Image (spheres, helix red, strand yellow):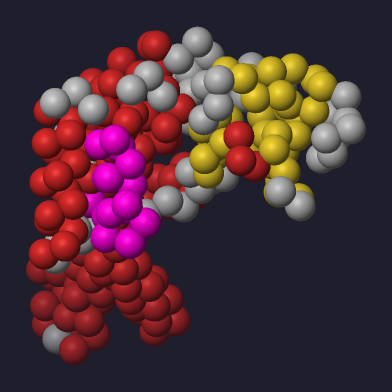
Amino acid sequence: MRRLFQILQRLGIMIFASALCLGAEAAPANGTETTRIFNQANVLFETGKYAEAAAAYEAIARTGKTSAELYFNLGTAHLKAGQLGRAIYYLRRSQQLAPRETDVRENLHFAREKAASGRPIKTQLGRSLTDWLALDEWAVLATIALWLVLGLLTANQLRPAWRNRTGPWLPPVGTTAALLLILSFIAWSEQTRGEAVVIVTEAIVRYGPLEESQAAHTLTDGTEVRVLDEQDGWLRVADADGRDGWLSSPQAALLSNTR
């Protein structure tokens, strides 16, 4: 029992720390200069200067001050400018921070429809989990459930007279905690899995990581791929149809573990 208590305590601390870190990373952009650039970008967007607006939003993103709103505006500006790959990339980043935001979901769906080969490559379960709750939200729920288990175990140890009252709660709370841990792990594995989005009109996928390697096939702007390997400026990728090969890194934007 003591060993189980220690394991659950460590898991709770790890997940709680992860939730705090993720929450901190998702903090919205702020600052006088950032606000000025953001407002300027909004004006550019409203006047139909979408490419210029996207460049202004990207200047903010490069400072590390990011938010779901910034990524949404970036993705939408690129979408209006006809840059489907970059639109999908930034809208997916926005969705990671605000999975239930309707506007983000609708614009991402629209961008994928416009992209000739653009379609998600996640599993149905993984896509449902990450569309329902953000990774840090799954972590917080799992942490709460774990601390409830720890609280019940502690009560049983310190107050044996309470066991008749707390004992019946342990199986359902423990099962809930275990289920939330599993779902959190699935959401984490889906979000941190190496993925990328093609951001050029036509990307040549080769049989090897060299310019001299024979071309295998091409991918169009907005195609979402899974990254299998990285080597000297090349990405080994697989698309939704299972085709794989090597793609020059500048032709795609990496999505793995993006925050």
Task: Specify the quadrant that holds the N terminus.
Answer: bottom left
Residue drawn at (32%, 52%), measured in percent from left and top?
A: 59
Q: Is residue 157 left or right of residue 246?
A: left
The answer to which of 105 and 152 lies nearer the viewer is 105
Q: Residue furthest bottom?
A: 158
Q: Tell me which corner region of the image, top left, top right, bottom left or bottom right, holds residue 44.
A: top left
Residue 147 % position (x, y): 23, 70
> Which range of residues does the magenta coloring cover?
52-68
Can residue 149 be seen in this snapshot?
no
Q: How far across and down, in percent of the image, does residue 93 sit? A: 35, 42
Residue 24 seen by the camera:
yes
Position of 188 with respect to 69 (left or right) is right
Q: Nearer the viewer, residue 225 or 10?
A: 225
Asked whether, in this view, residue 209 is left or right of residue 112, the answer is right
Q: Is 100 a magenta residue?
A: no
In this rendering, the answer to whether 250 lies above or below 118 is below
Query: Residue 191: image x %, image y %?
Result: 44, 45
Q: Position of residue 42 (x, y in %)?
A: 14, 38
Q: Is residue 140 above or below residue 210?
A: below
As rendered, which of 230 and 83 lies closer to the eye? 83
